[in-house]
Image (cartoon, rainbow, N blue to C red):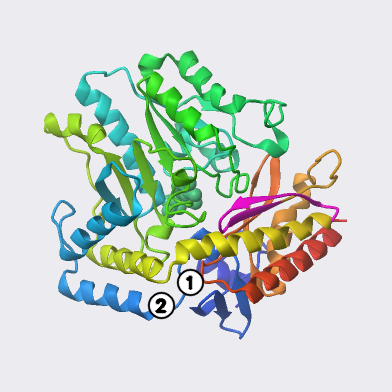
Amino acid sequence: MDAEAARRYGFATKAGSTPLRIARTEGVWLYTDDGQQILDASGGAIVMNIGHGRREVAEAYAREAERAAYVLPPFATESRVRLVDRLIGSWLPRGLTRIAFTSGGSESVDAALRVARAHFFAKGETKRWKVIGRDLSYHGTTLATLAVGGHEKRRAAFEPWLADLPKAPACYCFRCPLGKTYPSCAVACADEVEAAILRAGPETVAAVIAEPIGGSTAGALVPPDEYWPKLAAICKRHGVLLIADEVMTGFGRTGKRMAVDHFGITPDMLIGGKGLTGGYAPMGGIFASEAVVAPIAERGQEVMFFTYSAHPASCAAADKVLEILEREHLVERAALMGERLGKRLARLLEHPNVGDVRGRGLLWAVELVADKATKTPFPIAAGLTAKVVAAGIANGIFVYPGGVDPARDVITLGPPFTISESEIELIGERLERAIVSAVARVA
Ligand code: PLP
């Protein structure tokens, strides 16, 4: 396919970027229509938890589409009832029993922000509307979700439309924004969230939103163990709701059912997306405590649904995907294979331009730098990350580009949990070749 045709079909928007047409997908592999086999080391956008080509999910989806193609979102269907029971019984932190579904991650975060505001509005605390986010974060691409997020590149063109909401520094230990070092820092970045609440005026703050483990913005930022318990205590102290955005980390990706399970806390709201259906249907979810929803319900108020919220076939796909994760013990496998992937990626640190390798479970990132001693990034004009992705495809591997200054060049990895040891070895080999070749092109 020529570049013009690729642009027409929306496969590539940037001039000169590689058109890629996928004929079919299977396991951890993508097959292009010109016969190339590409290892999907990032499961698309860190989505494919159970891998590609699961016929039983497709069958569950088709059966439900035949039985109940569409119903108004407040109505229940059999597939939705099954999914809600499974989520409450086996997946969500205890106490998160109020569930709504959407068509994806951004819609879910957007709805959670509205639920947080509606909660205080219903309680008569009408001044509470601000939501504190963090730098180097991503919560979606609608205007509200961009506003609470800290992804400068994705926000840039839309700044005039974005509400000016307070931000706290990220847990980015590789280049600590506070110039501190763990553990002597005593997790001062959590104190900064409290400082932001105090500056904004606690009586005006509705919620704090954060990813328990960062996604691809700065690359798999794993906070110190004390961070989330501290954050939960701060929110409680100021009567602020804590929202954990687990669109990328939820449903086993980090080696536990939810990433907050690593830290032993239950947020007031948790948001899921990607892994909920493992890529088989567009769907997201908002999981809230009774206490969050009660004031809204008592007042007889509602939070408006999206037309495709709780779509029956999507519910059926999600239920089947979660059943497969349970039946095949894939969350445990994500933890095990994640350790192996981490060890293999750590070998890349021998390369002079691999500055950091970080992650947990099967969510990993490799940060590239021009100078390891000073952690100086490559110039923006070098476009190193894009070159690594292109070189990766040429070498038979797809890796997800990320990175926002100062974490400029970041590759995020998130393969299906079914990945084998030999495929992990291939990720290491092929990614290394892609990095070597991209750096050579920049030099
Ligand atoms: N929140 C987080 C943490 C994400 O990683 C993403 C997507 O990467 C989103 C929200 C937005 O989800 P979606 O792209 O499904 O709208």
Q: Secondary structure at mark 2?
A: loop
Q: Label 2 is placed on what type of residue?
A: Arg
Q: Quadrant of residue 79?
A: bottom left
Task: Quickly name the residue at label 1.
Answer: 51
In the rendered structure, are the residues bearing label 1 and label 2 in contact, judged by CB atoms less than 8 Å apart? Answer: yes
Using a 10 Å C-alpha cutoff, classify the residue at mark 2 as few (fewer than 14 neighbours), some (14 to 19) or many (20 or more): some
Instruction: Write the start and end of the magenta stretch as one range.
Output: 351-366
Residue 316 rendering spot, x and y as whole percentages? 26, 67
Does 275 appear in magenta?
no
For this orientation, the residue located farthest to the bottom is 35
Is residue 77 left or right of 10 when viewed as pictured? left
Residue 177 position by quadrant: top right
Give the class, few, some or many, for how many residues have Cα within 10 Å of label 1's Cα (few <14, many ≥20): many
Identified at 42% across, 37% down, the residue is 265
- Tell me if 408 is positioned left or right of 10 in this view: right
- Give the quadrant of the C terminus: bottom right
Q: Position of residue 63 (x, y in %)?
A: 23, 77
The residue under the point 68% across, 68% down is 427
Q: How many marks?
A: 2
The kind of secondary structure element at disc 1 is: loop
**Residue 310 seen from this side:** no
User: Is residue 352 covered in magenta?
Assistant: yes
Residue 422 appears in view = yes
According to the image, label 2 marks what residue?
54
Q: Residue at x 69, y 71 (%)?
A: 425
